[in-house]
Amino acid sequence: MPRLVALLRAINVGGRTVKMDALKKIFEADGFKNVATFIASGNVLFDSKAKPEGLERRIEALLQKELGYRVDTFIRSVPELAEVAKTNPFPDTEGGTTHVGFTAEPFDKAAVEKVMALKTDIDSFHIEGSDLYWHCSIRSSDSKFSNAVLEKLLKRPATFRNIKTVRQLAAIQP
């Protein structure tokens, strides 16, 4: 049974507070096994025999029912996250940060061109499938690029994680 990670968008931001133990119980009550959460930004690890594609919609419906609002969900296996961490094209540098933006669908040629047009001296991008690597040479909160900018550009949801968080998620054992 593969170890999976649900990357939840906008958990514990904008007044939508969810305790991680409550989130864990929601997943367990729906039949997921070996459920664990990691930091309060909406990372839920679990085991499931179901295909990841169907799980995203299932978890979104579950969270809508339990929390009363939509929570966009992106599923990756632990090996996929390990590959994301390994594929990171940007070096770890002092003062800069790398984030990975997760989306449900691969970037098509037009989306790649739109994102790459946003490159500046501060922000650099690299795309692999449905994942966007964003390296920001200053504090990311001081950049003009953000999750909201990406979502507006793509006209679909996304969620970002710091590359350090991706590495930690990939290393967690059940």
Image (tube, grey):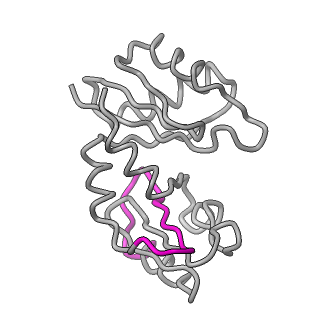
In front of the other: 53 or 118: 118
- Image quadrant for the C terminus? top left
Q: Position of residue 131 (x, y in %)?
A: 39, 60
Q: Residue at x 73, y 35 (%)?
A: 16
Which residue is outermost to the bottom? 121
Up-down: is 46 above or below 30? below
Q: Position of residue 38 (x, y in %)?
A: 49, 35
In front of the other: 123 or 163: 163
Which residue is outermost to the left? 1
Whether residue 148 is in magenta: the answer is no
Up-down: is 23 above or below 80? above
Which corner quadrant of the image does residue 103 belong to? Answer: bottom left
Q: Is residue 68 left or right of residue 20?
A: right
Q: Position of residue 29 (x, y in %)?
A: 48, 10
Which residue is outermost to the front? 94
In front of the other: 83 or 167: 167
Q: Residue at x 56, y 23 (%)?
A: 23
Q: Is residue 8 left or right of residue 52?
A: right
Q: Is residue 45 left or right of residue 154?
A: left
Which corner quadrant of the image does residue 87 belong to? Answer: bottom left
Q: Is residue 168 left or right of residue 12?
A: left
Q: Residue at x 32, y 49 (%)?
A: 81
- Image quadrant for the N terminus? top left
Q: Which residues are magenta?
A: 92-111
Up-down: is 61 above or below 5? above
Q: Residue at x 53, y 17 (%)?
A: 26
